[in-house]
């Protein structure tokens, strides 16, 4: 009796999975606008989930914005589906995925976001790493001395630095989870590329006389050997700020991280 019940449950799960895949295939022919509207407005979370998965199969870059917005859906299944869809689409979304990781309470959603970030980073590196690349840059975990909990500061700093580096010609950012062995293998056929490892730290957030100051420091190492080559300090101040204004803190942290990349690019030839 137990065996039959177990078989029946297994069969039901298989049938459910098949029906789910068929539904996604059927919806994949619908327009991105129609699917985006379903993801945003439909009352049934199952319909929103299917819409997200179908957007992931659309191959259309317009789906990225809708899927990023879907990461804030009240239902965890929908959020996970949006994260997985961005990874399947491979057309962007790293920034919104990282922002979601920083605030997400559900472990399964964080894992889905992390997996997709890894997929997107890997795809981008494979597409961009060429003989024209001059610097291969790995970004380490941010040392956060601000007293905040969680990974919010780390995610903000990494996202800001990665975007600033990718925007510069000749720079490629290594995947976050890359090992030393993987980096050596990747760089073996690109002997002229200089590997750089960055260890950022947010040293302080200070208020005083209506102003806010953020101090960031960047330790620069060779990569993958990690021999220290220098330090870059950055201090930015914003006036007209009320005490404990989180949005201003976040904006200034991101701006300081971007400024650190600018200073790095100005001095990297001497590293």
Image (cartoon, helix red, strand yellow):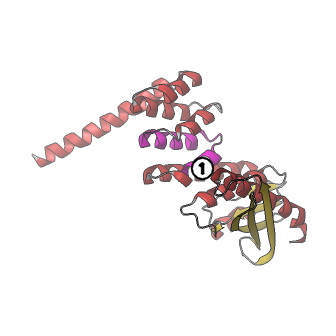
Asked if the stretch drawn in magenta spans residue 98, the answer is yes
Q: Nearer the viewer, residue 37 or 196?
A: 37
What residue is at 72 percent from the left and 75 percent from the top? Answer: 226
Give the x, y percent position of residue 13.
Answer: 29, 40
What residue is at 59 percent from the left and 57 percent from the top? Answer: 152
> Dot 1 corresponds to which residue?
99
| Res. 238 in view | yes
Examine the rendered structure and indicate whether residue 260 appears above or below residue 78.
below
* Within-10-Å neighbours for mark 1: few <14, some 14–19, many 20+: some
Give the x, y percent position of residue 238.
Answer: 78, 55
Examine the rendered structure and indicate whether residue 229 appears above or below residue 16.
below
Give the x, y percent position of residue 83.
Answer: 53, 43
Magenta stretch, overall SS: helix
Q: Does residue 51 appear to the left or right of 223 in the view shown?
A: left
| Res. 202 in view | no
Q: Nearer the viewer, residue 251 or 175?
A: 251
Asked if the stretch drawn in magenta spans residue 8, the answer is no
Q: State the residue lying farthest toward the bottom.
A: 227
**Chain part drawn in magenta:** 74-101
Q: Nearer the viewer, residue 136 or 249?
A: 249
Figure quadrant of the C terminus: bottom right
Figure quadrant of the N terminus: top left
Asked which quadrant contains residue 65, the reply is top right
Q: Does residue 255 appear to the left or right of 31 in the view shown?
A: right
Examine the rendered structure and indicate whether residue 185 appears above or below residue 41.
below
Q: Does residue 240 appear to the left or right of 120 in the view shown?
A: right
Q: Nearer the viewer, residue 266 or 3?
A: 266
Q: State the residue lying farthest toward the front.
A: 209
């Amino acid at each position: 009796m137990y065996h039959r019940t177990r078989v029946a449950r297994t069969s039901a799960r298989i049938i459910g999975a098949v029906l789910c895949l068929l539904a996604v295939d059927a919806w994949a022919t619908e327009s991105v606008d129609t699917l985006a509207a379903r993801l945003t407005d439909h009352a049934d979370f199952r319909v929103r989930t299917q819409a997200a998965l179908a957007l992931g199969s659309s191959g259309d870059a317009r789906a990225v914005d809708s899927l990023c917005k879907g990461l804030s859906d009240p239902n965890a299944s929908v959020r996970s589906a949006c994260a997985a869809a961005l990874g399947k689409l491979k057309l962007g979304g790293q920034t919104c995925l990282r922002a979601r990781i920083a605030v997400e309470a559900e472990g399964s959603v964080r894992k889905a976001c992390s997996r997709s970030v890894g997929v997107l980073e890997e795809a981008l590196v494979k597409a961009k790493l060429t003989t024209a690349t001059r610097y291969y840059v790995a970004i380490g975990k941010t040392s956060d001395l601000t007293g905040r909990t969680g990974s919010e500061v780390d995610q903000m700093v990494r996202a800001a630095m990665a975007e600033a580096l990718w925007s510069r010609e000749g720079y490629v950012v290594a995947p976050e989870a890359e090992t030393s062995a993987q980096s050596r293998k990747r760089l073996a056929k690109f002997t002229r590329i200089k590997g750089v490892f960055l260890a950022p730290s947010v040293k302080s957030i200070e208020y005083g006389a209506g102003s806010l100051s953020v101090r960031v420091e960047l330790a620069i190492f060779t990569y993958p050997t990690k021999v220290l080559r220098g330090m870059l300090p950055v201090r930015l101040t914003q006036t007209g700020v009320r005490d404990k204004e989180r949005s201003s803190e976040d904006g200034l942290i991101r701006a300081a991280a971007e400024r650190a990349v600018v200073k790095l690019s100005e001095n990297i030839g001497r590293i």
